[in-house]
Each structure stands twice: as structure tokens, then as C-alpha cells.
Amino acid sequence: MEVPLTVASAPLTLSAALAFAVLAAVAAYLFWLNRTMLQQPPSALDLSPKRYTPESVRAAADEFARNPPDVTPFLPPSTGNRYIVLGGAGFLGGWIVIQLLQRGEDPRRIRVLDIQPPTRLDLLDAQRKGVEFLLVDVADANAVINAFLRPWRAGDAAPLTVFHTASNIRFFERHELQLPASERVNVHGTKHVLDAAHEAGASVLVYTSSGSICIKPSRFWLWPWEKQPENFVHLVNDNTNVPQTHAGAWSNYAATKIRAERIVREADLSTGRGGVVLRTSCLRPGNGVFGPGGDVLCGAFLVRKTNPSWILDSIQSFCYVENMALAHLQLEASLLEKPELAGGDAFCITDPNPPITYGDVGTLENVLTDGVTTFPRFPPVLMLLIAHAVELYVHARLHSPVLARMLPPVTGDIVNLQPSLFSLTSAHLIFDDSRARRVFGYRPAFTTIQGLCKLVDEFKKSGGRAEFRQMLPGGGGVSFGLAAAQRGVAKAAREMGAIDTPGTPGTPC
């Protein structure tokens, strides 16, 4: 028997239908947006037409095993000068120290200032050979000057070069109220280093800036008639305009690196103690710097093993760490010999091959670790929704002292998952370093695939040894449910002596 539709039930049925229609429309929009975020526009794909395959990866690994690249022919000659490397116990700075030794510099004329002591085996060996490591926080002006003016074991007569690689990479923050956390090291620390360089009579200072300072924020929430996110493809060279306002930068990290780079470039031709003229120049790594020695990008993938990812289709330039270290030494040589060519300038640096995708990295690491390192796909639109929720929570605590007392802070690597991350990882970023090659003679030794092969090879040879910063919560990725497992691995690693904890700033190592 058919039940007649009552007047009371009609509005309820209509409301349910409307609710279903709204939910269906939202679901359709999110599905469409997800597809849009995964696309590879022709302007990017044309510059990166070939993907890694298991066969091409194995062939590259075999070739690497037979003929590993050698940086020696690419190193400028030894100078006999003194060297101070800010951040030299870490990743990139550590490789600069190693290459200084490789080209024959006196270990007693190399001084490293870092917030933590060396844990890398090659740097511990360098310390035994005579390289001096001092625990110094660059945000402490007095500590920096005292470290610069400390007497040298081999005498103070030789000219002084400074490599400043130290930075605080808080790429997940974009609100101006959060700026002090990034300014402390990136801006104030850079000023302290410059002041100390003047006080010590340094003649050359090379600053590690960032190619990401040229990146504009992307907008992923689109109108249905829009075809792709705003600022979805970036083709960056040395002439790309740098944002002039905080709102124009994709994160607080970028905003503070812009200011720091400007400070360094403006210091070119300034005069320090004894009338010594300081020549300065900057290098902008073309996106992610990776390689052995503790990177929080491709190396951290190997440490984590399981790496949930929504960026496998992103086409981006990469920069192998030994290439980046070579660029620092090659730029120094130019500033010493022909300072008018590169003084007060800034240069993009990347690997000598077309850009690749994060999926290519995943393919290589999965194949060369026999399937141990995996990259399960997550939908980017879901991750973007979670990112906004994380940022909303963080900002609620930031703006309300009451909520800050009531709610626990965000800890672990989930702090990385905030909207600013997507402008860096979900966009296609392609860098052109042709001007660096032309002006100061940048010559890289490794292609990206060779660098990745060496990374995996060194990781295997070390027995899977992790560097301290790769095990820090929030290092450079998001592991979700794997965080507890990571903490267990870190604890076990410390007990076995595989990784060390930092020391106390302000003391010799």
C-alpha cells in the first residue's frame, strides 16, 4: 500500500535531496581539483620528457659502479688561505670542508662554526686531521665575533674566506607573527657573520641563499573555469624578479632569505679591519639539495623507508650536494682572481641535466633498495585540506594566549604539512644556471641520477646510518602513522651509537 507524502515530510525530503546535491557537488569539485593538481603542463613537461624506469635506473647504477664521477678535476687550486665555514658540521657546509681538504688546504686553517658538533664520519676524520670545530649559535653576535677572532693554529697572516651556509629552514610558516623564528638565524645571524667578517679582515664571503626566493605563492583553490593553479610552473633564472613584500614570498623562510641575500650583496666592496676590502656573492641552489651526509630530502626518504607522497608528478630541478659545494669553491676562486665578474651578485645553481620528478626519485630509490623504500600515493587535495587544518590549529594557538595554554603545540613532522609547503612541492620548479657557468665558471661533476646513485650506495655502505638531523621530528617530510616507528628507530640508533645528539653551543667540539 502506497504511503501518501505528508506536508511535514516533504520539506525533510527536499532538505535531504539538497544536502545530497551539495555533497555531490563538493565531491565532484574536489575530484576535479585533485586531477588539476596532478597535471604536468606542457611548459614543464617539454623540459623533462623522459621518466626513470627500473631498467634505466639499473643501467645508471651499473655505470656509476664502473665509473663513479670524481670531483678532483673540478676543484680550483689550493690557495693556502684561512677558511671559516658557518654550518660546516652539517650537510652542505660539511661537503665544503671535505672539498677544501681534497684540494690540499691546511686543516689547521679551516674553522667550522655550527650549532652542533660533527657526527659525519668524514667530518670526524677531518677533525682528527686538525680542522677546528666550534659550537656557535650565529644568532649570538658576541659568540660569532669571538669565534672569528680566536687565534689560529697555523697563524693569522693568510687571507680569510668565509662560507656562510647556516640557515633555519622553517618552510612551513608564512604568518608575519611567526617571522622571529626565521629572522633569528637567517637575518640577524647573517648580519652577525658579516660584522664578524669585517672585524676579522675577511676578503671573501660566499653566502648560500636559496633559489626558492624567486618562487611566488601558488593558489590551488580554483574556480571551475580555471585550468591550472596560479604560479603552477616557475621557470627561474638569475633575472627572475624576487618578491619585494612579505605577502609576495611563499613562506617566512623565503622572506628572510631574501632579506639576508640583500644584506650580503650590499656588503660587497665594504671595508673591514686593516682596510681589507670584502667581496661578497651569493648562490641560489635550484630547489632541493640532496646527497650523502644528512640531507632531509632524498636521503631522508631512505631513512624513513615508507614515504607517503602526493608530489610524485611534480617536475623540479635538483641540486646534488657535491655540485653545490663545488659552486662555492668555484665562486670563491672567481672572487679572488676577478672579483668584478661576480662581486655583489647572485647565481642560480642546479645539476647539468633536465629536471626530473619526485616520482623519478621514488623509482630509483625503490629499485636500488630492492623495494625497501616505498612511496605510497596520497591524493594532493586531501593533503591540502589537512594542511589548512594544521595551519588553522597553529594559528589559533598563535593568536590566543588562552588557547595556547589549553591546546598542546603541534609536534613531530606533521608540522611540515601546512599550505606554504605546497607552493614549493606541488608546483613545477625549473631553474636555469647558464649564467653561473658563463660568469664565474660553474662546472658540476655529477648529474642528478649519478648523485642519487651515490646517495643510495653510500647509505648502503654505512649500514643505513642516519645523521642526527635526518631523525629530527619534522625534518623534511611527513610520515603520519610512521612517527612512532621513527622515534623507535632513533632511540635504537642512539643506543647503538649510529647517531649522536648535539652538544652545548659556545664550546669547542
Image: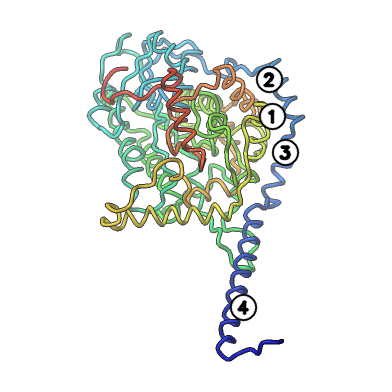
Amino acid at dot 1: Val
Residue 221 shown left or right of residue 62 in the figure: left
Residue drawn where x is 59% and y is 41% of the image:
431
Quick one: label 2 or label 4, which is nearer the N terminus?
4
Q: Earlier in the sequence, mark 3 or mark 2?
A: 3
Mark linked to residue 64 = 2
Label 1: how many residues lie within 10 Å, few (<14), some (14-19) or many (20+)?
some
Earlier-in-chain disc, 3 versus 4: 4
- Dot label at residue 311: none
Q: Position of residue 135 (x, y in %)?
A: 31, 23
> What number is the disc on residue 17?
4
Kindly report which numbered mark, 1 or 4, lies closer to the viewer in this rendering: 4
The residue lying at 72 percent from left, 25 percent from top is: 60
Tell whether label 3 touches label 1 (CB within 8 Å). no
Say what secondary structure mark 1 lies in: helix
Residue 223 in the image: x percent, y percent?
A: 59, 67
Taking the spot 70% from the left edge, 41% from the top edge, the residue there is 48
Front residue of 236/228: it is: 228
- Whole-angstrom CA distance, mark 1 to mark 2, is 15 Å
Q: Quadrant of residue 23?
A: bottom right
Counting from the top left corner in percent of width and height, residue 70 is at: 61, 16
Residue 156 falls in image quadrant: top left
Precedes in sequence: disc 1 or disc 2: 2
Label 2: element kind? helix
Quick one: label 1 or label 4, which is nearer the N terminus?
A: 4
Dot label at residue 51: 3
Q: Relative to residue 199, is residue 423 drawn left or right? A: right
- For marks 1 and 4, give the CA distance: 50 Å
- Name which residue type carries label 3: Arg
Q: Which residue is mark 1?
A: 367
The quadrant the C terminus occupies is top left
Query: Which sits in the foreground, 420 or 322?
Result: 420
